[in-house]
Image (cartoon, rainbow, N blue to C red):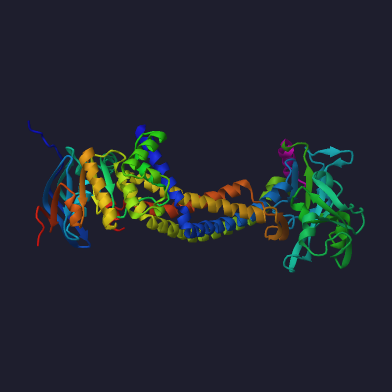
Amino acid sequence: MTQTVQTLVSISNVDKIFKRGSEEIHVLGGLDLEIPQAEFLALMGPSGSGKSTLLNLIGGLDRPSQGSVAVGGERIDELSDRRLAAWRARHVGLVFQFYNLMPMLSAQKNVELPLLLTHLSRSERKKRAAIALEIVGLSHRTDHFPRTLSGGEQQRVGIARAIVTDPTLLLCDEPTGDLDRKSGDEILSLLQALNQEQGKTIVMVTHDIHAAARASRTLYLNKGQLSTEAEE
Amino acid sequence: MAGAFNWFSQIASITAVNLRSLPQRKGSSVTAVFGIAGVVAVMVSVLSIAQGILQTMDNSASADNVVVLRSGANTEMMSGLVGDDTRIIAEGPGLARNAAGAIASAELFVIINLLKKATGTDANVPLRGVESAAFEVRDKFNIIEGRMFEWGLNEVIVGVGAKMEFEGLELGSTIPVAQEEWPVVGIFEAGGGLSETEIWVDAAVLQPAYRRGNSYQSVIAKLESPESFEQFKDALTSDPRLNVKAMRESEYYESQSAMLYNTITGIGTFIAVIMGFGAIFGALNTMYTAVSSRAREIATLRALGFHSGPVIISIMAESLLLALAGGVLGAVAAWWVFDGFRAATLNMTSFSQVAFAFDVSLSLLTRGILFAMVIGFIGGLFPAVRAARQPVASALREL
């Protein structure tokens, strides 16, 4: 009996050009990529190679200059800004290098933020945020503000915020880049568990080879092209 | 419907997040609030002068009173009526009458020179010669200190506003009138009207002192009812013996105050607009700083799926809230300091001083706060649009 692995993300012939004054910077050129459902993909490459740009295209934070980006069969590059924002809220969980938490909100309220875009009641939002914080092991820190949490704990809150809406896709931009080795390992174990136990599809941009080793596949981006091997 | 709910809920959520972060931006926020408060305080204070003058004129007028001047004269100063004229006028139809006859006072209006208490400079103070009917025509007249002057004697009574504003008008003092010293025997009030800036004396005493013979400058009379005005006016203007014009008292005082009111309102508005530009730049600076210090938060919210519309509105809400705080602060300060504050100024129309109380009315307070909101709106709009227009990816990249 064979199991069919469905493609979640399909990127086809994508160019991304940034304009700086009259100068055009070609970051991605004719790029193709398919990410199956429930994959944990690491994207590596030198600074400026376009890793974050690619991540932004997958997450609907940016649009390609040419080509198509489809997620779950939907062409997100063709959506209006308004619909794209709604799509992100429904389907994408974002984890940032510097956590990007709201400093004036408690851990619980930070995690509840994406749920404000749903029609859930206040009590339901609270319940779901509590579950997400429990998953990341921070049930005991719900009322703490970001400034009273360690870097590792803040990133856990960031992950709880990313998974609280039960998104299709988890996009992590250097999630361990601002953490010490021990905290970084804990975060990676958490991401791995979310991938293996909950079947989350994760795309992680990283510079760290140890972090990439936790992924099920690693791709290297250089000069706007993807490869399975790092360039010397 | 659900979409609209979602939109409003986003606005409420982002606004709440914004406002919670206000304490982190205390300095610039407080500066903006005080800047706007200053503008509103100045605007409301200056306009309350005009409002106070208008109020004084309004208090002076009674709906059933009529003022008669020589035809072509716009003020009592420019008018002249001989004794026969005033008798014919008093016989006119539609006037209220009592046992002594028509309630009509033929009056003389001269200017004397006194020192203004506030500045120590010369000021033109109205000295009015009245007849006994004057006290029935002005039904709000009331002696509050001393006594009424004796008819036929060189005695004066002084309006409470004049006493406050000019030197030497205390009870028992004397004032120089036509090389003589006339004693002040009483202080009166007149419902906050223009008469309170005047000094009153028997017209029959004032006429020889100023060598006016048997002439007057105006007749102030009480009508049977406000509706009798047209009948009275028509009778006077069609009488070949007279060359006079009749005006309702309200019209007369309106014409007396129009120039002063418009001048002060114009100056007040001009100052407010100039200061308002400064405050707009202050608010712009505050909101640009707010947006830039919260660039990460705004970009993150948008990345999470919050729309740019609610982001714009939430930044506007913060700006408007700061402006509202400034507006209320400035309006309350103006009301606290200036409402009821008494002063006098020269009315260029009558060439005499008019004492008035600054009137910080509710409509003025509302105008001040609305002006603050306009400043807040403009100050918040550009930073909000800039924050919302920046592509999410580039906003996140710049952090």
User: In the shown orientation, is residue B303 left or right of residue B193?
Assistant: left
**Measuring 36% from the left and 52% from the top, which residue is drawn there?**
B297
* A71 vs B216, nearest the viewer: A71
**Measuring 60% from the left and 58% from the top, which residue is drawn there?**
B263
Residue B171 visible from this viewpoint? yes
Q: Position of residue B379 (x, y in %)?
A: 44, 55
Range of the magenta residues? B227-242
User: In the shown orientation, is residue B84 left or right of residue B370?
Assistant: right
Most common SS among magenta residues? helix
Residue B87 visible from this viewpoint? no
Instruction: Pick out the residue farthest to the left.
Output: A1
Q: Quadrant of the C terminus of chain B?
A: bottom left
Check the image and report above or below for B377 versus B99: below
Q: Does residue B180 belong to the magenta stretch?
A: no
**Measuring 77% from the left and 39% from the top, which residue is drawn there?**
B223
- The quadrant holding residue A133 is top left
Q: Quadrant of the N terminus of chain B?
A: top left
User: In the shown orientation, is residue A148 left or right of residue B82?
Assistant: left
Q: Does residue B228 belong to the magenta stretch?
A: yes
**Measuring 69% from the left and 61% from the top, which residue is drawn there?**
B346
